[in-house]
Amino acid sequence: MAYNVETAFAEEAQLATRGRLTDLSRAARRNPVGAVAGVACLLIILLAVFGPSVAPYSPNDTSFPRLESPSLSHPFGTDNLFRDMFSRILVGAKNSLGVGFAAVFISTLIGVVLGVGSGYLGGVVDGVVSRVIDVMLAYPGLVFLIFVVTIFGSTFLSISVAIGLYMTPIATRVVRSSAISVRHQSYIEAALSVGCTPLRIMFRHVLPNVASSIIVISTLQIGTAILIEAALSFIGLGVSSATNPSWGRMLQETKPVWQAAWWTAVVPGIAISTTVLVYNLFGDALRDALDPRLRGS
């Protein structure tokens, strides 16, 4: 009898896995651009994790010819400080993506708490949260980022928190609108009728039903966070340093020689723009796949 039960559970798990794979395959065929973008996102993450290990040279090695154009030994050329740009691109991905993912985690965490709370509870809570978000949106973003980094220093934590707080209003508004639509569903009324507390309803019923919106906005904001980190690094306020590169820092360091050596501007620029593009495409694909109103459109 135990064998039959275990077999039944195993078969059920296999069917569930097969069903998820079928849904994934169907979504990939329906949106091949999004599928390719998803694979590219995964490759970029692997690049950030393993880049320092697979880089052919040390990012701080200055024994190469200055401003050598791309070649077999230096696929992305060398910069004005005699360093291999291919190695610096691989190593710099860790800083650029690390700050981006940390900032998105912070913005999503705060956005979920504020958005679900204000969307479900409404009333005074919703009014207070909405006014706070309005104030944050009214404050110039670049000024806010420079203010936080200047006060707390250019550390990984301070920059991640600054960018995360900058993106929090968008995440909060998206989650709040989804929570408001869920609040009036019949299963919420049923949970209230059996005596469930507001906290339990928000955690067990509202949050799972706004998860698709959370996933989509988080994916879309990764590209924005990476772009902001590159901008801060370009003006000298990033977490990177001369010995700890990021893509924005590479642009800042090679600015004086852009006209003489085009690759010093093109290579980091392509790295930033490609990463932002694939995460935006993947986020759009997720939105289309998770929103029933957009399926098949």
Image: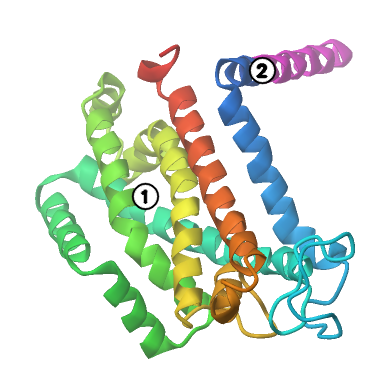
**Depicted 200 relative to depicted 181: above or below:** below
Residue 86 located left or right of residue 26: right
Asked if the residue at tag 1 contacts the one at tag 2, i.e. Cβ–Cβ closer than 8 Å, the answer is no
Q: Residue at x 89, y 65 (%)?
A: 73
Amino acid type, mark 2:
Ser
* Amino acid marked by disc 1: Val
Quarter location, residue 72: bottom right
| Mark 1 lies on residue | 112
Q: Which residue is mark 2?
A: 25
In the image, residue 153 above or below residue 193? below
Mark 2 or mark 1, earlier in chain: 2
| Residues shaded magenta | 1-22
Q: Residues within 10 Å of mark 1 (few under 14, many from 20)?
A: many
Q: Tell me the distance, in whole angstroms, between the alpha carbons under discs 2 and 1.
A: 30 Å
Q: How is the image coloured?
A: rainbow
Horizontal side of residue 99 vs 208, given as left or right: right
User: Of discs 2 and 1, which sits in the foreground?
Assistant: 2
For label 1, the SS is: helix
10 Å crowding of disc 2: few (<14), some (14-19), many (20+): some
Coordinates of residue 238 in the picture (x, y in percent)? 51, 78
In this orientation, which residue lies closer to the viewer: 137 or 187?
Answer: 137
Q: Residue at x 29, y 75 (%)?
A: 144
Q: Nearer the viewer, residue 53 or 83?
A: 83
Secondary structure state at the residue bearing disc 2: helix
Can you say which quadrant of the picture contains the N terminus? Answer: top right
- Numbered mark located on residue 79 in the image: none
